[in-house]
Image (spheres, rainbow, N blue to C red):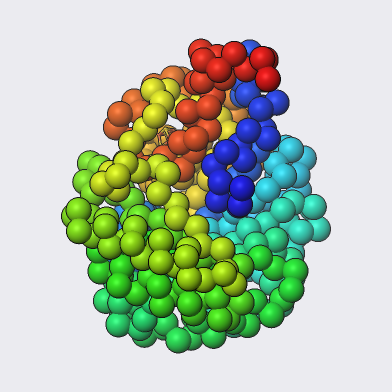
Amino acid sequence: MNPFSPEKVLYNMHYWEVMERMEIPPPLCVQLSPTNLCNLDCVWCMAEKQRTDPETATARFPEWAVDELPGFLSDWGVGAVYITGGGEPLMWRPVDDLIRNLRKADIQIGLYTNGVLLNHHKHILPSLDWLGVSVDAGNAEDYDALKGGGHDFERVVENIRMACLDEGLEVTWKFVMYPGNLKGMFRAAELAEAIGCKYIHFRPAAPRWWDNKKTQFTKAAVRMAMENLAKAHKLLDGIKVIGGTGKYNQHFEVEHPFKTCHAVGMWATFEADGTLQLCCDHKNNPALTLCRWDDLSEVAALWGGLKHQEIMASIDVSKCPKCTQSKANELYEQFCMRDETWKFFI
Ligand SMILES: C[S@@+](CC[C@H](N)C(=O)[O-])C[C@H]1O[C@@H](n2cnc3c(N)ncnc32)[C@H](O)[C@@H]1O
Ligand code: SF4
Ligand code: SF4
């Protein structure tokens, strides 16, 4: 197993036992998306809607969140937080203070960033448990062509090299596979190994919830991606190469091996525009909004209540995009709804 193994959700079966009684306990983990602003423009960006919709494009956390959110989350029982987007979290100036306060509240912290501004946030690296830097390319040309032409490839690589010097920090080079960057996969893995990353994590660009599940990949592109993954696995032993293709079929099309969603009871996203979203794969989808989080006491009061239960029951999984919590949904159905494994006969 590794940090990207979806089976790790099995550790949290005690949570499902509560859900089987039709209760929804506080989330295991939440995402914080402090801003919808971004300094890049990746062609596959799942947050594109919220980054470009005039209503949400400039949204960011209120400053009081720095002091209030960590204590609230800790009291609520949340043990782990992803800081992500929305847009690019390091573009929200108070993010360092938020991270420091989350650490003081004894919450585990992971940060997703495009890495462009990482050199300005060196001092918060020791407060993080893990860092995922979305580079998504093995050379500057692909980077510029697919990520909005920021000319930042070398700078991001140097920033990752700097982060890797922090021995307590687990650093992953993240790589969204897309038809235009597949030739650079092996070079990216070599570079990631050379600068000290522990992991390189490849996964296909997922269609967004408004894309109607269309895949960008031809058969030849899928073959090239799988060959490059195999080559990196075989030839590189100083880095762990992860192929995150489990949520897709052999054509890199989204497939859901479950019929109901229970994952929207397990985590949530505090969005920059002040809404609490129940699914990170449905960014900016009002159907998955539980409430606003400006009043944190309302979040605790509404979580697990009738509205939450109704949203959970109304989800039509066949219309869902790539499901980050696919394995959780699959295992919940198998163990809690059907027990196809005779789970007590070990
Ligand atoms: C939405 S971004 C926000 C944080 C930051 N701006 C970044 O890019 O890391 C969070 C993660 O989602 C990934 N991502 C964005 N769109 C995606 C898509 N369509 N399919 C798969 N991953 C995607 C990004 O590469 C990044 O690793
Ligand atoms: S850097 Fe992150 S938020 Fe910005 S466009 Fe790329 S994926 Fe989207
Ligand atoms: S993608 Fe669909 S099934 Fe998966 S967690 Fe989100 S709402 Fe649930």
Instruction: Write down the quadrant of residue 87 in the picture.
Output: bottom left
As rendered, which of 8 and 129 lies closer to the eye? 8
- In this rendering, the answer to whether 193 lies above or below 340 is below
- x, y (%) of residue 197? 59, 72
Q: Which residue is drawn at 48% across and 28% down?
A: 330
- x, y (%) of residue 264? 51, 32
Q: Which residue is drawn at 26% across and 57% down?
A: 223
In this rendering, position of residue 193 left or right of residue 318: right
- In this rendering, the answer to whether 13 lies above or below 81 is above
- x, y (%) of residue 122? 67, 79
Any part of residue 253 in sight:
yes
- In this rendering, the answer to whether 198 lies above or below 273 is below
Instruction: Write down the quadrant of residue 39 in the picture.
Output: bottom left
- x, y (%) of residue 119? 59, 82
In this rendering, position of residue 281 left or right of residue 219: right
Q: Which residue is drawn at 57% across and 69% down?
A: 237
As rendered, which of 180 and 309 lies closer to the eye? 180
Exactly how many numbered labels are in the figure? 0
